[in-house]
Amino acid sequence: MENIVPGIAVELMPGITRITAPNPGVMTGPGTNAYIVGTRELAVIDPGPDIESHVKALVAAVGDRLRWILCTHTHLDHSPAARALKGATNAQIGGLACAQDGRQDAEFCPDQVLNDGDTIRLDGVTLRAVHTPGHASNHLCYLLEEKRLLFTGDHVMQGSTVVISPPDGNMLAYFASLDRLLGLDLAALAPGHGRLIETPHDEVRKLVAHRLKREQKVVDALALRSGTLDELVALAYDDVSEKLHPVARRSLHAHLLKLAAEGRAGADGDRWRAL
């Protein structure tokens, strides 16, 4: 199994290089992956956090060939380095800005707003934006059409599931965005955290199954009792370390909001109940 080492440029296949930022942790795994795509003209997908050593590693790898800096979304471990990288290379920034919820890169300002279906063309390379809201309302995956390789940011992560944090995170949208990937012709996924995933549709189905299993635990918890998020997380996430319950509470909230939208749960103030 590959051991991901931050700061090392790794050629994953011709025209695809990964440099992982030195920000490992519970939420980021081995760190945030920045992908360098192309040969004579380059794009960087997800420049990552604004850590000086990481920016220097990216600049050294791209030289004077960088044309685009593309961000999947504006969480603080994915987009802040875009400004420093643009300053060093004069490349253009592409992506979607987002309403501020305390977890976004407030200074993100794309030179080109990318919407679903928009394409970025480099020498011999076509990257198509695929809007995949759920983890974040402005989340874009990027499909490298020539290789059927999808750069998934945090929509699909290798080795773990992603947190859905309301109000910007939306569980209904997340399920719909996962379902959309099943309709794409994909050879592999390049996630924002972890290794390449070479069974893309199987991985997506596993994520859907995991989320449905968790949703059932939420439904079962509501069948036992009504409660606040803090009370319900102990039931719905009893298989998760209590240290992670503050994070799990956010995804629990997203599940409850989905159930409410479907007419299966309701809230009286801060207390949730089954309908």
Image (cartoon, rainbow, N blue to C red):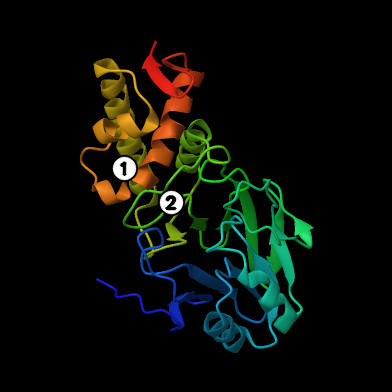
Q: The disc labelled 2 sits on which kind of residue?
A: Val
Report the amino acid beneath label 1: Lys
Picture coordinates of residue 232, whole percent (x, y): 31, 29
Q: Secondary structure at mark 1?
A: helix
Residue at horizontal 68 percent and vertical 48 percent from the top: 98
The residue closer to the viewer here, 243 or 129, is 243
What is the count of numbered marks?
2
Q: Residue at x 40, y 21 (%)?
A: 272
Give the crowd class for mark 2: few <14, some 14-19, many >=20 residues within 10 Å: many
Q: Is residue 143 above or below residue 163?
A: below
Coordinates of residue 202 in the picture (x, y in percent): 33, 46
Q: Is residue 237 left or right of residue 49?
A: left
Residue at 48%, 26% in the rendered image: 257
Disc 1 crowd rating (10 Å Cα; few below 14, some 14-19, many 20+) is: few
Q: Where 133 sits versus 157, above or below?
A: above
Side of 107 relative to 166 (left or right): right
Quarter of the image with the C terminus is top left
Coordinates of residue 3 in the picture (x, y in percent)? 29, 75
Circle 2 is placed at which residue position? 156
- Report the disc number at residue 96: none
N-terminal label among 2 and 1: 2
Q: Residue furthest left?
A: 239
Marks 2/1: CA–CA distance: 11 Å
Q: Which residue, given by chain and number where applicable, does mark 1 sit on?
A: 206
Q: Residue furthest right?
A: 111
Q: Position of residue 11 (x, y in %)?
A: 45, 79
> In this rendering, is residue 156 above or below 147?
above
Mark 2 vs 1: CB contact within 8 A: no
